[in-house]
Image: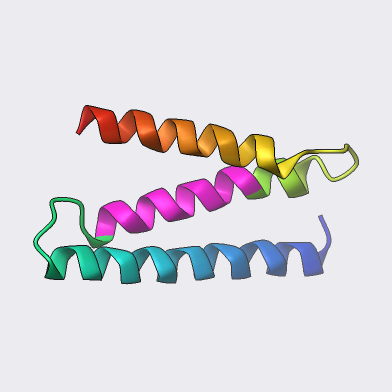
Amino acid sequence: MSYETQLDVVLRLTIALILGAVIGIEREYRGHPAGVRTMAMVSVGSCVFTASGLFILAGHVTDPTRIAAQIVTGVGFLGAGA
C-alpha cells in the first residue's frame, strides 16, 4: 500500500469519526440511548469495512455497493437487537 493510499484511508477514517461523533452529540442532546461512542464506533467500523474492500483488494474489481449493502444489513441487525 502506497503512502498516498495510507493517507487516504486515515483521512477517511478521521472524517468518519468526526461525523459519527457529531451525530452522536446530537442524539445525546435529544436524549436518545445511543450516543457519541456508539455512533463513532459504528461509523468508523463501517468505514474500515468499506476501505478494506476497496484498498486491500486493489488489484481486484470490487463493487462498493455490495459492501455498503452488507453494512446496512449489519447495522439493521444491531438496531433490531436494541
Magenta region: which residues? 37-50
What residue is shown at x 59% (from left), y 41% (from top)? 68
How far across and down, in percent of the image, does residue 50 sit? 62, 46
Q: Taking 76 as reference, is 66 left or right? A: right
Quadrant position of residue 52: top right
Q: Position of residue 76 (x, y in %)?
A: 37, 34
| Image quadrant where one finds the N terminus | bottom right
Of residues 15 and 6, the one nearer the viewer is 15
53 part of magenta stretch? no
Query: Position of 46 compared to 27: left or right?
Result: right
Q: Residue at x 54, y 62 (%)?
A: 13
Residue 44 inside the magenta-drawn segment: yes
* Main SS of residues in magenta: helix
Q: Is residue 22 above or below residue 20?
A: below
Quadrant of residue 65 within the rendered picture = top right
- Quarter of the picture containing the C terminus is top left
Check the image and name the residue furthest to the left. 31
Residue in view at x 60 percent, y 65 percent? 12
